[in-house]
Image (cartoon, rainbow, N blue to C red):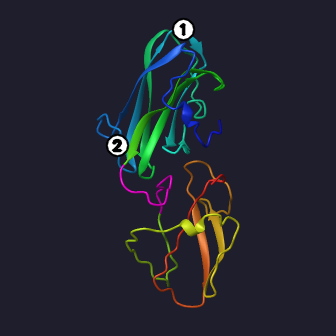
Amino acid sequence: MVKWLAFKAEWCKKQGTKEAEIIAVKIFDVVGKITDRFKCAQKAKVFVEFVVHEEVENPHFGVAIFREDGIYCYGPNTLFDGYRIKKLKKGQSWFSIEYKSLNLMPGEYRLSVAIWDKKEFLAYSYHPGFYKIKILGENKNGQLFNLPYQWKLQHHQMLSTANIEELDLSFLENQWDKILSSEDIEIASMQLLGNKEDLRDSFETGQDMEVRIKIKNKRDWLNEYLWFGIYREDK
């Protein structure tokens, strides 16, 4: 299975060897109410109850989010985050993960929940695509995330806001590594900067990034807008 695209035929089919077994999953909103509907950037908590039938050593827990079409969005687990769980003893227990800001774009999503062995080779209990959530609103361009951002413009330029009901990005399909330009407005350069204004092409998760774009224009701007998009390498 390619990690970036879920094998949807497995969704809603419980898997695992059952030394430890997930018995209930609840999803809470910011006020502690069980729900499957959220606003973009709202806080959410996934609470997982499980029972250990036989002791297991060095397990780890994971919760992954997939878009309804199978696109992989986000999937932290205790192993990647550096938490070491030496042993699960027999009996009932729980784990939870809290999203401080659920920055998914509007749409329908699936959660996969798992208890894995040390190397994520063997699943003690795995519920792929079992739990549905919906981010309310419209997403007309198929975007994945709503990242916090701030626009800045050189002082002698005017920056204003406008309500664009729908931005048609279809003409950008199959345009990778191509430069589209006009005679009177041209992107001269683009730089990626870290929080110390250092040039770089790699960033850590959660790190600030500034995109600095220089534009050559032979006429005044008139009702133009600047668009910047981030795509994963596999599109």
Task: Give the magenta-colored segment's residue range.
Answer: 136-149
| Residue 142 horizontal side relative to residue 117, left or right | left
Q: Secondary structure at mark 2?
A: strand
Q: Hey, which quadrant is residue 74 in on the image?
A: top right
State the residue at coordinates (42%, 49%): 107
Does the image show residue 151? yes
- In this figure, which residue is indicated by the disc labeled 2? 37
Locate the C terminus by quadrant.
bottom right
Q: Is residue 152 above or below residue 121?
A: below
Q: Is residue 137 magenta?
A: yes
For label 1, the SS is: loop
Residue named by callout 1: 54
Location of residue 7 by image quarter: top right
Q: Residue 38 versus residue 77: which sits nearer the camera?
A: 38
Residue at the (65%, 52%) spot, across then down: 234
Tell me the amino acid under the disc marked 1.
Glu
**Front position in the image: 12 or 49:** 12
- Identify residue type, mark 2: Arg
The first of marks 2 and 1 along the sequence is 2
Q: Dot 1: within a 10 Å radius of its alpha carbon, few (fewer than 14), some, or many (20 or more) residues?
A: few
Q: Is residue 133 above or below residue 169?
A: above
The rendered magenta stretch, by its main secondary structure, is classed as loop
Q: Is residue 121 above or below residue 174?
A: above
Report if residue 92 lies within the magenta region.
no
**Mark toward the viewer: 2 or 1:** 2
Which of the pair 26/12 is nearer the observer?
12
Q: How many marks?
A: 2
